[in-house]
Amino acid sequence: MEYLLAHFSRSRRVVVDDIFSGRTEEIIELEAGAHIVALGPPYNFTPSSINIVLRDTSPLTPMEVAFDPI
């Protein structure tokens, strides 16, 4: 298992590979490998998605991605 933490200015649903997988500011468990990360609607953030490769993470050291409001 690998771990992801997505940041945004407020709580939003996190979409990984077109599936709602958790919420911002919460650790999300995913399989190792390549993924596309985005946020759910409304689509008032940038970037629209982030391509990542998850490996060598832990609950204490997740991969972190950030989205900014527009």
Image: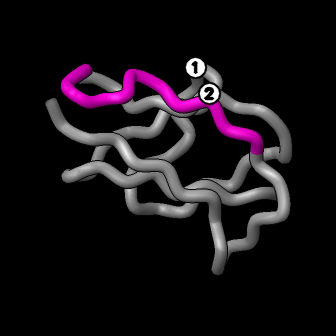
Q: Where's residue 8, x and y in %?
A: 29, 49
Q: Nearer the viewer, residue 41 or 45?
A: 45
User: In the image, is residue 62 above or below residue 65?
Assistant: below
15 drawn magenta: no
Q: Where's residue 47, x and y in %?
A: 37, 28
Q: Residue at x 39, y 61 (%)?
A: 25
Q: Residue furthest left?
A: 70
Q: How is the image coloured?
A: one colour
Gap between marks 1 and 2 measured at Cα: 8 Å
Q: Which residue is mark 2?
A: 36
Q: Residue at x 77, y 57 (%)?
A: 2
Q: Residue at x 26, y 41 (%)?
A: 68
Q: Where's residue 19, x and y in %?
A: 58, 26
Q: What amino acid type is highlighted by mark number 1?
A: Asp
Q: Which residue is mark 1?
A: 18
Point out the image quarter for the C terminus. top left
Residue stretch rendered in magenta on the structure: 43-53
**Hey, which quadrant is residue 44 in on the image?**
top left
Question: For numbered disc 1, what is the local secondary structure?
Answer: loop
Q: Nearer the viewer, residue 44 or 22?
A: 44
Q: Where's residue 27, x and y in %?
A: 55, 62
Q: Residue furthest bottom?
A: 60
Say whether residue 58 is left or right of residue 55: left
Q: What amino acid type is highlighted by mark number 2?
A: Ile
The answer to whether the residue labelled 1 contacts the one labelled 2, judged by CB atoms less than 8 Å apart, is: yes
